[in-house]
Amino acid sequence: MSRQIFALFFLLALGACTVLDSRAPEEVVADRAQQRLDTLMEGDYEASYQFTTPGYRTTEGPGRYGTRWAGVSMWLSAQVSNVTCSGREQVDRCEVTVEVSYKAARYEPTTTFLVEDWLLIKGSWYLYQNMTE
């Protein structure tokens, strides 16, 4: 009897996972990308680092990652403006366009756009960090 209850619970939990994230990949990625941008704007590089691919995290530490984003202190705002996803049989890659407003010392505020690649790895979306940039 306890095995049947456990099996029923497992099936219900598995079904709930599917229902919980039935959103389009573009929406899921937009949310994750914005969460990452928010952590960057807060200066929390450790939290932002957690959005990078597991492979990246095996080669670069949070300190090195933080140096890549040192200019964030000039940002006034950062918002996901567009997400486009693709894949052969299932969506596994998304391109995210981010609108960043910033103010450098002695200059007027300006706006620029960044393009990020996000990859689906084992059911989760991660920011791809190009090591050559």
Image (cartoon, rainbow, N blue to C red):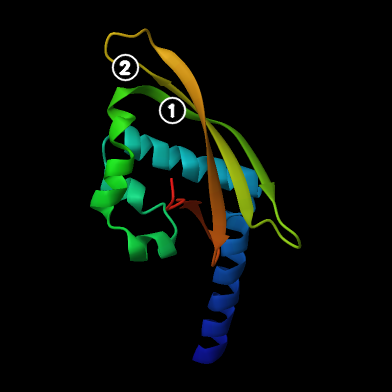
| SS assignment at label 2 | loop
Identify residue for label 1. 78
The quarter of the rendered structure image containing the N terminus is bottom right
Q: How many C-alpha atoms fall within 10 Å of the one at disc 2: few (<14), some, or many (≥20)? A: few
Q: Which residue, as the protein is rendered here, is positioned at the far right?
A: 89
Residue at 60% in and 43% down: 95
Amino acid at the residue labelled 2: Ala
The quarter of the rendered structure image containing the C terminus is top left
Above or below, 81 against 93 in this view is above
Above or below, 3 against 109 in this view is below
How many marks overall? Answer: 2
Where residue 28 sits in the image (x, y, percent)? Answer: 57, 47
Where residue 70 sits in the image (x, y, percent)? Answer: 28, 35
Comparing labels 1 and 2, the label whose residue is closer to the camera:
2
Where residue 106 sits in the image (x, y, percent)? Answer: 28, 8
> Which of the 4 image quadrants contains residue 91?
bottom right
> Which of the 4 image quadrants contains residue 26?
top right
Residue 121 has which mark?
A: none
Q: Which residue, as the protein is rendered here, is positioned at the far left?
A: 63
> Which of the 4 image quadrants contains residue 109?
top left
**Alpha carbons under labels 1 and 2: distance apart:** 15 Å
Depth order, front residue of 26/115: 115
Residue at 48% in and 42% down: 33
Residue at 23% in and 50% down: 63
Where residue 82 sits in the image (x, y, percent)? Answer: 61, 33
Identify residue for label 2. 104
Amino acid at the residue labelled 1: Ala
| SS assignment at label 1 | strand
Depth order, front residue of 122/23: 122
Q: Earlier in the sequence, mark 1 or mark 2?
A: 1
